[in-house]
Image: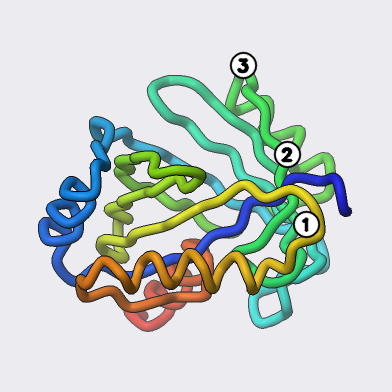
């Protein structure tokens, strides 16, 4: 794993999105135009919610601006520190069938509007997630064997330095959305 690139992130529920954008603009961040993302999440057969995600393999099929991307993630240290492989695919329906044939099952659909900005090595994502609200993700692509917790601590320190009201979450959108849907039943 020493040479593999991992996506390591931290995630926060945002209390006042306009205040967050103002502070980040003051630091030189310019957010992109909003993009609608329609994600179908998949879990490998045999895994179910309540089990640890660490070491399990998950897939995602995303449609954005009429283009489709297939992604496989394997949480290594925790849910938000993953080995990730992603590629564009031509046809969503056929890829969905292929994912099922590979031994995955669909878990939950996540639809969000995302704006992004870059600051140094960080990708900043401001997400309005249908059914959940507004979230702020800070992602870093990391190579080598640096502990994910150390990277997440640095990303969290940056988030806290912004001085805005953020509530940290250690769960992925699919888990958060599933919990929200279960609570509303």
Label 3 element class: loop
Left or right: 36 in relation to 151: left
- Please name the residue shown 73% across and 70% down the image: 77
Label 1 element class: loop
Q: Earlier in the sequence, mark 2 or mark 1?
A: 1
Q: Earlier in the sequence, mark 3 or mark 1?
A: 1
> Rounded to the nearest whole Å, what is the CA distance between mark 3 and mark 2?
17 Å
Q: Looking at the image, how many numbered discs can be counted on the residues? A: 3
Q: Are marks 3 and 2 in contact (CB under 8 Å)?
A: no
**Residue pointed to by mark 2:** 85
Left or right: 73 in relation to 1: left
**Residue pointed to by mark 3:** 90
Category of crowding for the residue at label 2, using alpha-carbon neighbours closer than 10 angstroms: few (below 14), some (14–19), many (at least 20): some
Label 2 element class: strand
From this view, report whether residue 180 is shown above or below residue 30: below
> Rounded to the nearest whole Å, what is the CA distance between mark 2 and mark 1?
11 Å
From this view, report whether residue 61 is shown above or below residue 58: above
Left or right: 150 in relation to 108: right
**Residue pointed to by mark 1:** 57
- Please name the residue shown 14% across and 66% down the image: 16
From this view, report whether residue 60 is shown above or below residue 178: above
What is the residue that sits farthest to the top in this orientation? 90
The numbered disc on residue 39 is none
Q: Position of residue 34 (x, y in %)?
A: 25, 35
| Tag in front: 2 or 1 | 2
In the image, 28 versus 69, the foreground residue is: 28
């Amino acid at each position: 794993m020493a040479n593999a690139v991992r996506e390591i992130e931290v995630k926060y529920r945002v209390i006042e999105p306009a205040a967050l954008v103002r502070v980040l603009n003051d630091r030189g961040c310019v957010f992109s135009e909003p993009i609608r993302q329609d994600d179908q999440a998949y879990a490998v057969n045999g895994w179910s919610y309540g089990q640890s995600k660490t070491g399990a393999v998950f897939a995602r099929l995303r449609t954005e601006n009429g283009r489709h991307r297939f992604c496989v993630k394997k949480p290594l240290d925790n849910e938000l520190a993953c080995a990730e492989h992603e590629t564009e695919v031509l046809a969503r329906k056929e890829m969905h069938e292929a994912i099922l044939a590979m031994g995955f099952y669909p878990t939950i659909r996540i639809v969000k509007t995302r704006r992004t900005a870059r600051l140094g090595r960080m990708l900043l994502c401001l997400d309005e997630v249908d059914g959940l609200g507004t979230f702020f993700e800070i992602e870093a692509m990391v190579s080598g064997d640096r502990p994910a917790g150390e990277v997440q601590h640095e990303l969290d320190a940056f988030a806290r330095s912004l001085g805005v009201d953020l509530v940290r979450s250690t769960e992925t959108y699919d888990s958060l959305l599933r919990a929200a849907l279960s609570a509303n039943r």
